[in-house]
Image (cartoon, rainbow, N blue to C red):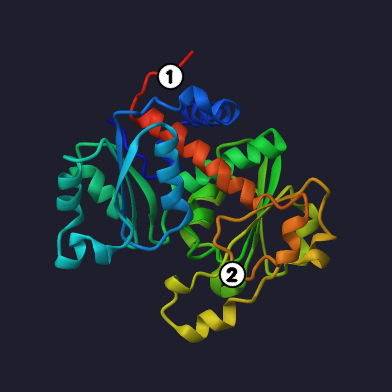
Amino acid sequence: MRHLMSPLDLSTEELEKILDLASDIEKDPKKYAHLCDDKRLATLFYEPSTRTRLSFEAAMMNLGGKVLGFSSADSSSASKGESVADTIRVVSCYADICAMRHPKEGAPLVASLASNIPVINAGDGGHQHPTQTLTDLLTIRSLHGRLDNLTIGLCGDLKFGRTVHSLIEALVRYKNVRFILISPEELRIPSYIREDVLKRNNIEFQEVERLEEAIPALDILYMTRVQKERFFNEEDYVRMKDFYILDKAKLELAKEDMYILHPLPRVNEIAVEVDSDPRAAYFKQVQYGVYVRMALILTLLEVELPC
């Protein structure tokens, strides 16, 4: 039995197999429509989510399986003081696999240690979001045809953005990947990512404040929102939330084959006028998320695949 806490839990070979499977699901979803007819997915979401929770649910239902769970801590026994370990022990009696989102870093790992079923980390605080990373990798590979020899711009909240942290850790394993980190001083990438991931792996990176300065060199621009829920001070959030707004004027500086990704939800960091640009890939990214979660569920449940 395996769990997924971080993208690094998968070797690059295993990762490629999951991405290949997701691509095949995209081409022929009917082939996979009944592989989980007798399986149940538990979605244990201790904080709000739209895309991730519904994407997991859509993935399991597309495979023929069923879904149970809760969408907030208030609607679970956590509100009565039940521990994560006890919750997963109970849920293991009802389901075959679990996706857990929790505001506390490491909570899904605690659950995995007590679980009798595979646990997928669906986001833990500002730490990791591995299935979003798989989605991002599938999107980049589908659009550019590769995961190496790319210049990736990460823009916005790089301090608290778990999607950013997970994506960097995954991409440093590919050749000639260069990062341009675009953020205000207060939201720079954490030192452990800078020192232990980028510098330790001899990855080329640059930290800048102005999006206009970085955008001409990029193959991928990964926008993020400033996350109100991660701030302790309302004043700091208000001051930071409009620091970057991608609009058509800035996009004129970009390459014709530069694609824009965003883990969503967006607030106003991407102007609505950008949505019609062929380089806007963030809604395609949502669809890829369903395919990659279908592939991950099949992999962790060790379901026999059709020929």
As shown in the figure, which amino acid type bears the numbered disc 2?
Answer: Val
Residue 20: quarter of image: top right
Count every numbered label the image shows and give the total.
Answer: 2
Residue at position x 58%, y 83% in the image: 239
Residue 137 is situated, as x and y percent measured from the top left of the image, at: 58, 41
Image position, residue 81 (x, y; %): 15, 65
In what element is the residue under mark 1?
Answer: loop
Q: Percent position (x, y) of residue 296?
A: 43, 34
Q: Earlier in the sequence, mark 2 or mark 1?
A: 2
Q: Image quadrant for the N terminus?
A: top left
Residue position marked by numbered label 2 in the rendering: 267
Question: Where on the picture, by quarter, is residue 143?
Answer: top right
Q: How far apart are marks 2 and 1 (CA)?
A: 40 Å
Residue at x 15%, y 46% (from the top left corner): 90
Residue 127 appears at what percent x and percent y? 41, 57
| Label 2 Cα neighbours within 10 Å, binned few <14 / some 14-19 / many ≥20 | some
Give the structural element (helix, strand or loop) at label 2. loop
**Foreground pick, 287 / 230:** 287
Mark 1 Cα shell of 10 Å, populated few (<14), some (14-19), many (≥20):
few
Name the disc covering residue 305, or none.
1
For image coordinates 72% across by 69% down, the residue present is 210
Above/below status of 106 relative to 18: below
